[in-house]
Image (cartoon, helix red, strand yellow):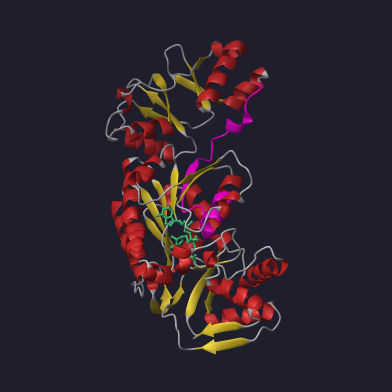
């Protein structure tokens, strides 16, 4: 056969069939009876819809009426009219391959829409002529990382649904260029109904929504526990029930708190804030749910930096760049603490790599996300930014120290996902400074740029 499409026997359980399709480059399977004769085809979405409407996953796939019975025979494939009819039906249902059957009903060959179109000179809708990259739910897609990730996913051909309660407004989403693949749902992750509804027809979930940062969670402990732990757990459970196996959870290197050695994913966790404790709690809950059919990936990111349409000025590189502009001075608290840094676009790149990777490589695992070369001491960060922006003076204040101090190993990420960062703190600082200087970002003191003011964020 020209294409190694997935064939499953009618006695296969729905959850096994989903798993087989997911591990293949295709989004559908041919269902065969016990003698190997073709019964019909199902897409992964058909199977997930069965689960959403109450199926358990253990039922045999042959017990359900099959959704697609497209087929050609060795005779009918030569007929232009017959092939054209099958191609338009396939396009309508988003199916990309059709079997060619022997007179006994066995699959002899497989043809794609393009093959048939070329053969008979048919015109097709190219938008669905290859396997769709899939539909990704980005919860917290209007945030600092979320809006950058959503735009990149769209550029890469994914459909994106954003679920966000817009704590910091929705301007970042509105700046994403018009795109038919983008759907925006305003809602709160803590609402179970909203959360389940947002999973309809989704292939992969990225959970970014949280009360983010030590100061913000200190001010809002109840919302932090509700969002970062309880709602997170509910979303992961809903994904597991619906067999949405690919679940990326945004955690943080803050879980390491304070550590003398270079810390890999096995290192002891030593949280120094409620924020980090809630992230650890959720990591444990989510990983505990993992099995062959729900394969979460925990991404412990370093501190992000860089420009995003939802700008944050409460992240170290961004703060120093902004202070260089507004005060002509960089203030350093302590300075000896180690902190792994990661550009926001590089972070988005890692999420996309995980979504596109074989689930067996990335599922049911924890990754530190960053790069060894961007483990910095805060003093060094200040010196690089000050030098880049033109000898900005650096002042010190040792009265208000951030207790976090950790140096992290990113070997696993480099090895498995071959990630190499493209962003650098000097160029990111320059970009932010220039945006302030040109007026592209105005009034950086506005509360909306600082997560710990979120209850009183103003436009
Ligand atoms: N920014 C960093 O340096 C950093 C570092 C490590 C990990 N992380 C993690 O990455 C994720 C994204 O961080 P960010 O910097 O983009 O944060 P952010 O605060 O900019 O974005 C969070 C988004 O989630 C939304 N949100 C919050 N609660 C919600 C709820 N109950 N329902 C729906 N939407 C809700 C907010 O409106 C916001 O758009 C977070 O989970 C954070 O813990 C961030």
Q: What residue is rendered at 61% in x and 49% in y?
A: 176
Of residues 249 and 412, the one nearer the viewer is 249
Q: Is residue 377 left or right of residue 23?
A: right
Question: Per the image, is 134 magenta?
Answer: yes
Question: In the rendering, at what x and y percent does residue 347 appear?
Answer: 53, 60
User: Image quadrant of residue 221?
Assistant: bottom left
Q: What residue is rendered at 37% in x and 71% in y?
A: 218
Q: Is residue 145 left or right of residue 69?
A: right
Q: What residue is rendered at 56% in x and 40% in y?
A: 181
Question: In the rendering, at what x and y percent does residue 371 appear?
Answer: 53, 68
Of residues 415 and 394, the one nearer the viewer is 394
For the question of whether residue 18 can be seen, the reply is yes
Q: Is residue 387 above or below residue 349?
A: below
Q: Is residue 180 left or right of residue 201?
A: right
**Which quadrant is home to the C terminus?**
bottom right
Question: Per the image, is 190 magenta?
Answer: no
Q: Is residue 228 above or below residue 375?
A: above
Q: Is residue 417 above or below residue 13?
A: below
Of residues 77 and 204, the one nearer the viewer is 204
Question: In the rendering, at what x and y percent does residue 269 appear?
Answer: 34, 71
Numbered marks: total: 0
User: Image quadrant of residue 68?
Assistant: top left
Residue range of the region highlighted in magenta in the rendering: 123-151
Question: In the rendering, at what x and y percent does residue 70 appear?
Answer: 48, 19
For the question of whether residue 283 can be seen, the reply is no
């Amino acid at each position: 056969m020209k294409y190694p499409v997935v064939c499953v026997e009618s006695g296969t359980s729905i959850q096994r069939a989903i798993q087989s399709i997911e591990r293949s480059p295709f989004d559908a399977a041919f269902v065969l009876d016990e003698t190997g004769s073709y019964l019909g085809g199902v897409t992964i979405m058909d199977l997930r819809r069965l689960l959403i409407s109450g199926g358990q996953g253990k039922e045999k796939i042959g017990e359900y009426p099959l959704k697609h019975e497209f087929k050609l025979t060795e005779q009918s494939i030569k007929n232009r009219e017959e092939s054209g009819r099958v191609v338009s039906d396939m396009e309508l249902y988003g199916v990309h391959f059709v079997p060619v059957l022997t007179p006994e009903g066995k699959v002899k060959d497989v043809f794609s829409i393009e093959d048939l179109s070329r053969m008979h000179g048919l015109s097709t809708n190219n938008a669905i002529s290859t396997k769709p990259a899939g539909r990704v739910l980005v919860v917290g897609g209007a945030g600092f990382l979320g809006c950058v990730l959503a735009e990149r996913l769209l550029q890469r051909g994914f459909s994106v649904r954003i679920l966000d309660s817009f704590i910091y407004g929705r301007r970042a989403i509105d700046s994403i260029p018009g795109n038919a693949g983008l759907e925006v749902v305003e809602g709160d992750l803590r609402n179970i109904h909203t959360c389940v509804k947002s999973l309809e027809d989704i292939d992969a979930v990225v959970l970014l929504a949280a009360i983010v940062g030590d100061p913000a969670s200190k001010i809002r402990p109840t919302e932090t526990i509700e969002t970062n732990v309880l709602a997170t757990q509910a979303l992961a459970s809903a994904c597991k029930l619906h067999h949405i196996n690919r679940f990326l959870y945004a955690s943080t290197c803050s879980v390491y708190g304070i550590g003398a050695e270079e810390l890999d994913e096995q290192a002891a966790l030593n949280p120094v804030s409620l924020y980090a404790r809630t992230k650890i709690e959720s990591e444990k809950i989510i990983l505990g749910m993992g099995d062959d059919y729900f394969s979460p990936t925990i991404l412990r990111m370093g501190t992000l930096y860089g420009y995003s349409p939802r700008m944050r000025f409460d992240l170290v590189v961004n703060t120093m760049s902004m202070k260089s502009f507004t005060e002509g001075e960089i203030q350093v608290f302590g300075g000896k603490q180690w902190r792994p840094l990661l550009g926001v676009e590089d972070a988005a790149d890692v999420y996309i790599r995980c979504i596109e990777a074989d689930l067996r490589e990335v599922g049911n695992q924890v990754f530190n996300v960053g790069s060894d070369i961007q483990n910095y001491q805060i003093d060094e960060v200040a010196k690089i930014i000050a030098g880049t922006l033109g000898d900005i003076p650096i002042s010190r204040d040792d009265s208000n120290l951030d207790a976090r101090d950790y140096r992290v190993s990113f070997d696993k990420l480099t090895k498995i996902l071959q990630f190499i960062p493209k962003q650098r703190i000097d160029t990111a600082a320059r970009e932010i400074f220039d945006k302030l200087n040109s007026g592209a970002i105005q009034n950086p003191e506005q509360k909306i740029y600082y997560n710990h003011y979120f209850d009183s964020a103003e436009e």
